[in-house]
Amino acid sequence: MSKPFSRRRFLRTAVAASVLPIFPDAVRGAPPAPKRLVAGTRMLEVNGRPAKVFGLTGPDGRPGIHLAAGERFRVEFANESGARTLVHWHGQLPPWTQDGFPWPQTPPIANGAVEAYDYLPIPGTYWMHSHHDMQEQSLMTAPLIVHSAAELREDRQDVVLMLHDFTFRTPEEVLAGLTGTSVAAAQAMAQKTEQASADKDDADVTEARMVGMEGGAPRMAMPGMAVSGPGGMQMHMDLNDVHYDAFLANDRTLADPEIARVERGGRIRLRVINGASSSQFWIDLGDLVGRVVATDGHPVHPVAGSRFPLAMAQRLDILIDLPRAGAFPILARLEGGGRQTGILLATADASISRIAESAEVAPPVDHSLEARLMAAEPLPPRSADIVQTIVLGGGMKPYAWSINGEYWPQVSPLMLTKGQRVEINLVNRTMMAHPIHLHGHAFQVIAIDGRPIQGAVRDTVLVMPMARVRIAFDADNPGRWPLHCHNLYHAITGMMTEFRYQGIII
Ligand SMILES: [Cu+2]
C-alpha cells in the first residue's frame, strides 16, 4: 500500500514545485486538494441476476476513501445517487455536525449537491455508510482506511474484505415483512426516524434523564419477553431476522470470488469490515493462523487464531504470514446458517478451485474473542463520574426494539457534561444479540457479565442475549450523538437513543 501513497506525495510535491515561483505564499500553506467521494448507483450481478445498488466511489475509482498517514479527512462529497443521502464515517471522531447523522441541524444532502468535510481522522480500519432511510441495505457503504506511519513501516500488503448481506427485495419490503405491515407503512417508519427529536420541545429536554445515577430502568415492560435470567441464551436465541439472497465479499459471491494476488510467503494485513445490515459472521482463515491486532481500528494485544466472530459494523485487522505458495480462502460464515462468502488470497501459480456457498451451520457469534481482547492503548485509569444503565428491550412479535423502554425518535436524551468519565452498563433483556454502536467516541469494554476485563477499545460492541457488557469512555466530543443497535431493522424500529452534551443548543 505504501507505493500509491508515495506516488501521490511525489505528485503533490511536483505540482507544488511547478507553481512555487508564481504563488509561493499560497502554496506553502495550502492543504492538498480535497478528495472527491461520489455517491452513485451501479449494477452488480448477483446469482446471475442484475441488481441496481448504491455505491460510494473515491478519487482513485476504488470504493470509499483511503488516507495516507497524517492526512486529514478532507473530502468533497458529491451526491449523484438520484436520492437524498447522508453518509456517516463509522467509528471516526469528527465534530458532531460532520458525523453524517440526520439531526435536524444536519439534514440529508439533496441529489446533485456537494458537501465538504474536513477533520482529523484516527488511524485504522473504518467504514462509511448512509444513515438516511435504509440505504445501507442497498450498499451505500464503503471502506474508510486511515493508514498510520507505524503500520506502513510494517510493510504488509493491505487486503480489505468488506461483507454485505444482499437481497433483491427493497429494504422497505424487508421491513414490511418483519413488522407485518405494508411497504408504505414501512417507508413511513423509516422516514419517521429522521424526525430525530426534531418534534421534541423544551419540555421534553427538561424531562431528559440526567446521567449520573445507577438505574434508568425501563419505563414500560418489554413486549413479549419472558425474562429467564443469565444462562437462558441457549434456549431460544433468535438469529438472522432476514433471509438474504446472497452474502457478498467485496461485492461478489463465492460463485465468482475476488482473488487477491499475494506473494509466496507474503505478509498480509487483512482488514475485515462487517458492512452487513442484519447478519453476523465467523471469519474463517481455514488452515492459516492469523493474529488479530486491532478491533474497530483500535490496537489490541495480538490474539492468534483461525476463526473469529465478527458482529455487525465491527472490524478486525488480522496479520497473516503466508506459509507457502497456494490459494487460501478467507471465508465469512453466517452465524446460525449454512451459508458463506469470501475471497481468496492466491500466489501467482496457485490453482483455484470452486468453493461452495453452502457449508456446515456455524454457531452463533459470541463473546469468545471479546473476553480475550486487551486494549494496547487503554483508557487512562480513572473512576467513573457517572454510571448509567441502558436496557435493550424488544422482540420478534411484535417486531420492535427499544432502549430503556423507549422507541426512537420518541426518546429522552441522556445528558453528558464535557470532561466526564462515563460508564455504561448495557443490559440485554432480549433473546437476540445486539451490536451496540456509539457515535463520536471510542469506548473501552471493561466488563462482560460482571467480570472485569481490560478489554478492547471499540466503537461497536455485541451484547449477547440476556447478557451484560460494561463500557467506559471520556466525554470529550461535545454534541448530539446517537447510540444504537447496528442491526438496521432493530435501529429503524426503535433501538436508538441520544447522548447529548450540556450546552448544545438544539
Ligand atoms: Cu439489535
Image (cartoon, rainbow, N blue to C red):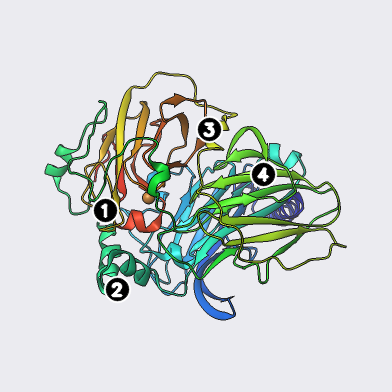
Query: Reading the chain from its start, which is encountered first: label 3 or label 2?
Result: 2
Distance in Å between CA atoms under marks 4 and 1: 37 Å
Q: Mark 1 CB in 8 Å range of ligand 1?
A: no
Question: Which is in the foreground here, disc 3 or disc 2?
Answer: 3
Q: Which residue is mark 4?
A: 318
Question: Which is in the foreground here, disc 1 or disc 2?
Answer: 2
Left or right placement of residue 41 versus residue 436 in this view: right
Residue 496 in sight from this viewpoint: yes
Question: Label 1: few (<14), some or many (≥20) within 10 Å?
Answer: many
Three-letter code for the amino acid on which mark 2 is drawn = Val
Question: Which is in the foreground here, disc 4 or disc 1?
Answer: 4
Q: Residue furthest front?
A: 235
Question: Label 3: few (<14), some or many (≥20) within 10 Å?
Answer: some
Query: Reading the chain from its start, which is encountered first: label 4 or label 3?
Result: 4
The picture places residue 52, in percent across and down from the top left corner, at: 50, 77
Determine which quarter of the picture holds residue 358: bottom right
Q: Nearer the viewer, residue 482 or 201?
A: 482
Tag 4, which secondary structure?
A: strand
Name which residue lies at 45% across and 25% down: 451
Name which residue lies at 52% across and 67% down: 55
Tag 3 and tag 2, C-beta contact below 8 Å: no
Q: Which residue is mark 1?
A: 196
The picture places residue 269, in percent across and down from the top left corner, at: 70, 46
Distance in Å between CA atoms under marks 1 and 2: 22 Å
Three-letter code for the amino acid on which mark 4 is drawn = Ile
Determine which quarter of the picture holds residue 299: top right
Q: Which residue is mark 3?
A: 371
Q: Mark 4 CB in 8 Å range of ligand 1?
A: no
Residue 439 in sight from this viewpoint: no
Q: Which residue is mark 2?
A: 183
Query: Reading the chain from its start, which is encountered first: label 2 or label 4?
Result: 2
